[in-house]
């Protein structure tokens, strides 16, 4: 059984449901709490959650 309590990096646009997930990447996990997953909206500017 896989652990469902692992960390995921999510951009603020996706986390706040302002944009859909357009990019999902899985890197090598850095430690046992890391899933390696990153999900992003695909927008280039993440300096503000509203951009």
Image: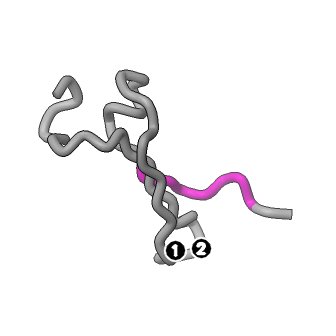
- The residue at 25%/40% (across/down) is 43
- Quadrant of the frame with the N terminus: bottom right
Marks 2,1: beta carbons within 8 A? yes
- The residue at 42%/49% (across/down) is 23
Q: Judge depth for marks 2 and 1 and give the one in front.
A: 1
- The residue at 66%/53% (across/down) is 5
Q: Is residue 49 above or below residue 35?
A: above
Q: Is residue 8 magenta?
A: yes
Instruction: From the top left corner, tell me how far across and down residue 50 is, in percent.
Output: 20, 23
| Residue at disc 1, secondary structure | loop
- The residue at 42%/52% (across/down) is 9
Q: Is residue 23 magenta?
A: no
Say which of 26 and 33 sits in front. 26
The dot on residue 9 is: none
Report which residue position mark 2 lands on.
32
Q: CA distance from mark 2 to mark 1?
A: 7 Å
- Quadrant of the frame with the C terminus: top left
Look at the image and give the residue range highlighted in magenta: 3-9
The dot on residue 29 is: 1
Disc 2 packing (10 Å; few <14; some 14–19; many ≥20): few
Disc 1 packing (10 Å; few <14; some 14–19; many ≥20): some
Instruction: From the top left corner, tell me how far across and down residue 31 is, in percent.
Output: 52, 76
Q: Is residue 14 above or below residue 22?
A: above
Q: Quadrant of residue 46?
A: top left
Q: Quadrant of residue 15?
A: top left
């Amino acid at each position: 059984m896989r652990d469902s309590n692992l960390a995921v990096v999510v951009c603020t646009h996706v986390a706040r449901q302002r944009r859909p997930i357009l990019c999902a990447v899985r890197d090598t996990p850095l430690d046992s709490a890391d899933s390696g997953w990153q999900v992003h909206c695909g927008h280039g500017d993440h300096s503000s959650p509203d951009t």
